[in-house]
Amino acid sequence: MKLCCENCNRKLHKHGRYFRWVTSKSEHIHIPIYRWLCPSCGTTISLLPDFLIPWARFTTWVRESVIVRKRQGKSLGWIAGAVVSTRIGLSPSTVKRWWKQQTAKVAATSLWIASQLVKAGCEEDLLRMHPKPVAVEPADTWIWFGQLVQRYAPRLSRLRGYWTFLNAKIPREYLL
Ligand SMILES: [Zn+2]
């Protein structure tokens, strides 16, 4: 693997590592995160594995499956008990917080996906696919998001979910 600096395109050098705790469906894992340094401008980056985003302790797959079940109408308590093992534990209030946070983000992320589809030559009226463009309810925007993602990643395996794939492509402010 060869990494280049975003500023000056020089090849980055390995620059140590640190360990981070990550929580999956059934275990806490201590994983190494490698840091890279640009010898020319001094920029350092940490390369996270694709199933993590910088500010989340739970893997992307766990967070996505919480939202999928909330969209299916499951209760906070049911989701908290179903998505991770009892050994890991997840509280209904965490489920509620994730739902609020992700729902606040999904419109912006959806617009970004729509803009990429348009750039790629998509000629459908993507805004009209939104089930309720005025006086939007969160559930409506999630439906729109689902339709956009299916166009953006139509043949993706459902095994790893959509967010891991999306997060590898989208700018930091739209990460899910
Ligand atoms: Zn540089």
Image (cartoon, rainbow, N blue to C red):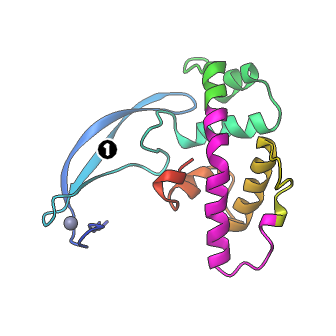
Whether residue 120 appears in magenta in the rendering, the answer is: yes
Q: Outermost residue toward the right? A: 131
Q: Amino acid at mark 1?
A: Ile
Q: Is residue 68 above or below residue 168?
A: above
**Residue 38: x, y in percent?**
18, 62
Query: Which residue is label 1 attached to?
Result: 33
Residue at image point 65% right, 27% down: 95
- Which one is nearer the viewer's eye here, 9 or 106? 106
Q: Is residue 75 above or below residue 7?
A: above
Left or right: 52, with 156 as reference point: left
**Residue 50: x, y in percent?**
47, 51
Does the image show residue 114? yes
Q: Is mark 1 within 8 Å of ligand 1?
A: no
Left or right: 12, with 93 as reference point: left
Q: Is residue 96 above or below residue 3?
A: above
**Residue 149: x, y in percent?**
70, 60
Whether residue 65 appears in magenta in the rendering, the answer is: no
**Residue 59: x, y in percent?**
52, 39
- Which one is nearer the viewer's eye here, 119 or 74? 119
Q: Outermost residue toward the left? A: 39
Quarter of image, res 65: top right
- Dot 1: what SS? strand
Q: Please state the quadrant of the image where ligand 1 appears.
A: bottom left
Quarter of image, res 75: top right
The residue segment tinted magenta is 98-127
Q: Main secondary structure of the magenta part?
A: helix
Residue at image point 77% right, 59% down: 147
Quarter of image, res 40: bottom left
Residue at image point 82% right, 37% down: 72
Query: Dot 1, how many residues are within 10 Å of its Cα: few (below 14), some (14-19), or many (20+)?
Result: some
Q: Outermost residue toward the front? A: 135
